[in-house]
Image (spheres, rainbow, N blue to C red):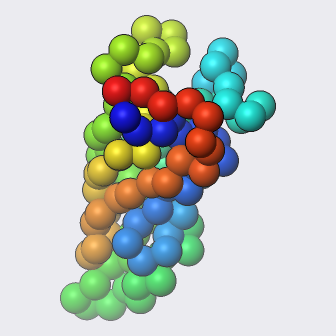
Amino acid sequence: MAFVLTTSSNVHCPNQGKVSPTGQGRLTVDHKPVVRLDGINGRSVAGCTITTSNSTKQCSTVTSATGTAGKLTVGSVAVALDSLSGATDGSSPGLAATAGQSKLKAV
């Protein structure tokens, strides 16, 4: 089981870049809306520490994210979990998350 992501979760690239996900207010944890992948995909990455040069590119946008609950949905779309993985458009394209909450788990 993994924890459900909310708008206060830490979604980040490997180089400290942060993603501010948008949430779905119909389901909340600790008064924070839960997040679906459509609240992460396409979002901006801020604060990536990679310096853009001829051979490297700083992360600026989430290009893909995977990792959702099998049964827990909001608006018929599965919620995102802290087991999330994905990619950005940068030279270090990984994406990871920590839930920041310990009340709601899903499989």
Question: What residue is drawn where x is 35% and y is 46%?
Answer: 84
Quadrant assignment, res 35: top right
106 vs 99, left or right, is: left
Left-right relation of 105 to 88: right
Q: Is residue 21 left or right of residue 36?
A: right
- Taking depth in this image into account, of 68 and 18 the one nearest to the observer is 68
Residue 36, how many percent across, how many down? Answer: 47, 30
Residue at coordinates 32% horizontally, 90% vertically from top-left?
Answer: 53
* In-front residue for pair 58/94: 94
Which residue is the extreme one toward the top?
Answer: 76
Residue at left 40%, top 84%? 50
Q: Residue furthest left?
A: 55
Q: How many marks?
A: 0
Residue 61 in percent (x, y) is at 42, 57
Residue 94 vs 51, above or below: the answer is: above
x and y percent of residue 23 in the render? 61, 32
Residue at 62%, 44% in the rendered image = 101
Q: Against 105, is 59 above or below?
A: below
Quadrant location, the N terminus: top left
* Residue 75 showing in the rendered view: yes
Q: Quadrant of residue 71?
A: top left
Q: Quadrant of the C terminus?
A: top left
Q: Position of residue 104 (x, y in %)?
A: 56, 30
Near-viewer residue (104 or 20): 104
Residue 39 visible in the snapshot: no
